[in-house]
Structure formats: C-alpha cells, structure tokens
Amino acid sequence: MVDLTRRGFLAAGLAATAAVAAACAGSGGSGGSSNSGGSGGDITLRFLTNHPGSSKAVEQELIDAFQKANAGIKIELLDGGKDYEEVAQKFQTALSGGTKPDIIVVSDVTWFNFALNKQIAPLDDLFAGANLKPGDYVDSLLADTKFDGKHYAVPYARSTPLFYYNKDVWKKAGLEDRGPKDWDEFVSWAPRIQEAIGGDKKAIVLADSANYIDWVFEGWNWSKGGAYSDGWDLTFTSPESVAAANQLKDVVGKWGRLTSKPENDFGAGLAAVTLQSTGSLKTISTTAKFELGTAFLPGPQGKSCPTGGAGVAVAADIADDRKAAAVKFIEFLTNTENTAKFSQATGYMPVRKAAVDDPSMKAFIEKNPNFGTAVQQLPHTRVQDNARVFVPGGGRDIGQALQQIATGGDAAAVLGALQKTIQGKIDSQITPKLPK
C-alpha cells in the first residue's frame, strides 16, 4: 500500500524522481557547473535573495561580518526580485544555463519542487563541518523543509500572519483592546469599526490573489473547521470550507476590500484591520500614525494560524567545497546573535531557540510588545495544507479563486472548479511520480 501521508509522499516522490532529477539539475557532487571550483584559493558564493522584510541592508551587514571572520570566503549578494516567486524563477532560469547562485532563499511554496528535482542539496552531512546543530533551531520551523530524513533548507525569514488593528479606531468604536476571539465576533464588531473609521475607509483590508490571500485565509478556513486539503484528499468543497469562503465574501463585501499592498493601506490609516505577515511589522510600525495593536489570528489556538516565510538552501550542482562554505555562511547568518538582529530589523521570527532568551531580544520585545505577539503565537501554529504548499501553482490557484469569491463569485461553484483544477494537477504532476 502506498503511503500517501505528507512525509511518506515526499520520501517516495524523491526516490521515484531521482533519474529525472539528475537530468534536470546535473549530476550534483563536485563538478559539472560553472560554480565548481574554489579549491586552493578564495571562494566567492552567490546569495540569491529577495531581501525579505526590506532586509537588504541587514543582509549586507551580516555578510560583511561573516567575511571579516572568514577571510577565505566571499559572499556576493544577488537581487532575486520583489518576492519569493521571483527568486524561484531566477533560480530556475539559472539552472538552464549561465551563472548559478550557490545559496538561495526558498519559501514554503517553492522549496519542495527544487528538492524533489534534486536542484537543492540535502544539508545534513554538511552540518557538523559548519558547527550547525539542528537541535538549536525551533523544531517546527526546521522540520518544515525536511523529508526522507534530510533537511533541504535552514529556517531564515520565517513568519506567521498576525491580526493588526488600529487601537485609535478601537477606542472610538468602544471595543476592548484585544483581537476578536473568532471571525463571528469580528463580524459582530465590524459595523462599529466601519462607523468609527468612517468615509471611504474600510474596516478591513486583505491581500489580493497575487499577494497571498491564500495564505492569510488558510487560518480563517481552519478556524471554521474547513481546510484546503486533508493530506492529499482535497476538501475545498466541504461544507465548512464553503461556509468560511462565504464569510470572507460577506466581510469583504460589506466592510472591506482586497489590495496588492494591504500593509501600506493599513499603515496609511485607510483601514482599521489587516492580516499580514510578521515580516510586515517593521513597515507598518514605521508608517502608522496611530497606536498599533497586534493579536493572534481569530479562532482556536493551535488550529487557526499557519507558519510561512522562507529558509535558505544550497544549490545541488556545485562543488563540495562550495557546499561546505555555503552551510558555514548559513550557520553564521542564522546563529543566535544574528537571528536576533535579523528578527529585530524585520519582524520575522527568531529561528534559533536561544534567540528568544538573548538579552537584546528580551529588551526588544519589552520595548516592542507587538513583536512579542508574534513570538507568543509561534507555538500555536500548524503545518500548512498540501494543496497550497506542494501542488505546483496551488497557492496561486487558491488565491485567484478566493479573490473571485470575495468580489462576488458563488463560493460553492468557484470552490468546485478549484477542486477540479487542483486534483488535475495532483493526478498529472504528482501521482505519476509515486511508486506503483
């Protein structure tokens, strides 16, 4: 009997695609790419990143510190584009020819395809040489990119969605200074919030289909008892998922809108609420001219919030000495001191367990309690649904369907069509790779 659990699928899929992957990404090991070499002299590694959380300056600061401490290794910072998808596209293009990056930022929805096709390397055999200890990382974050007993990325810019709210509007509406316990309570509050913010402004603004509404709605759906999938069984058309989508449609139709930059609209005071990444905290805190509040996502703890964000991976088809140097840089980039620095600069999660107890982090949380909300919510997250993170283009398909519903589409009909689309991709692109 074929094991169709998430981890079982990953392990089986990796074995089943080994031959194809070798053709796609070269033979791996220590030769065959334009990045090979480095023996007998300095190594220059290329780091492809979208600078998550507007982190280009802090990334360069960490690179400079690493180079100072490791004279034989240079790091070239490459601009991967505006988001994780553009990084993935640039990496994929580089695999077809030209100069390949050595270190790549990979997101929750991009790493799997690269790992399955042997385009990023398993890292475990390199950990000891870089003094990287897996047990030092937050377990759930490190496990997100593990399959077949191997880790394919190390946590870096990891996040959860947060419930951001305008405390000034809350006061005017006569609400308690807290987030709603669930989405039904938010619906009961929404008329007062809309009246308090007034004019053409909205009670809530959410990301559109191109900006991860599929991610922020995932927790909303879970909180209502729905899901995108249960393992590989799709559940878009379950009564709970349809009800959650109808509630989204009702909320957006009466009191909200979708936009490409919800953090900007919210920070500008054009909406009283948004759901956005912890990685948006710095931007919102800087731009908001009102008292900012953050809260857990509405719904039962442990059932209403997904993890997200990105890790750092190493290209498979580069020389072994380059791989070893790359993991040494990754260990430095994500060590306790530097993950604390990166988290404070961006709002992303501290990925090392010890970072939460770092004196600078404790002082930062005390001074920035909104960041403390993100840290406190982290233990109450859950693994994302396969339909979003493992199906090629699944997140995009889900986002487009949700936008169609939120702007007036029939939830049952749209979700029915979505389920057929996602099932077709599973049948044509995933099932054939499983052993018979």
Image (cartoon, rainbow, N blue to C red):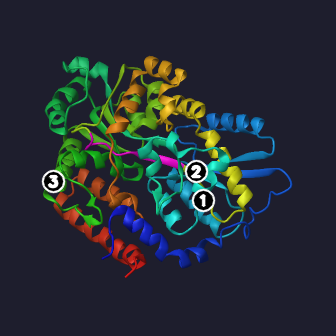
Q: Residue furthest right?
A: 40
Residue, disc 3 = 240
Q: Kindly identify the residue that appears in the image at 58 percent across and 43 percent down.
A: 51
Left or right: residue 65 versus residue 187 is right
Element type at mark 1: helix
- Of badges 3 and 1, the one in the foreground is 3
Q: Quadrant of the C terminus?
A: bottom left
The dot on residue 219 is none
The amino acid marked with disc number 3 is Glu
Q: Which residues are magenta?
A: 302-311
Residue, disc 2 = 81
Q: Kindly identify the residue that appears in the image at 49 percent across and 18 percent down.
A: 363
Q: Nearer the viewer, residue 417 or 157?
A: 157
Residue, disc 1 = 90
Q: Looking at the image, can residue 256 be seen?
A: yes
Q: Quadrant of residue 23?
A: bottom right
Give the mark nearer the N terminus: 2 vs 1: 2
Residue 389 within the segment the image draws in magenta: no
Q: Residue furthest bottom?
A: 436
Q: Quadrant of residue 390?
A: bottom left
The percent position of residue 248, horizontal first and vertical second, equals: 22, 46
Residue 308 within the segment the image draws in magenta: yes
Element type at mark 2: loop
The local crowd at label 3, few if under 14, some if 14 to 19, many if 20 or more residues have their Cα within 10 Å, is some
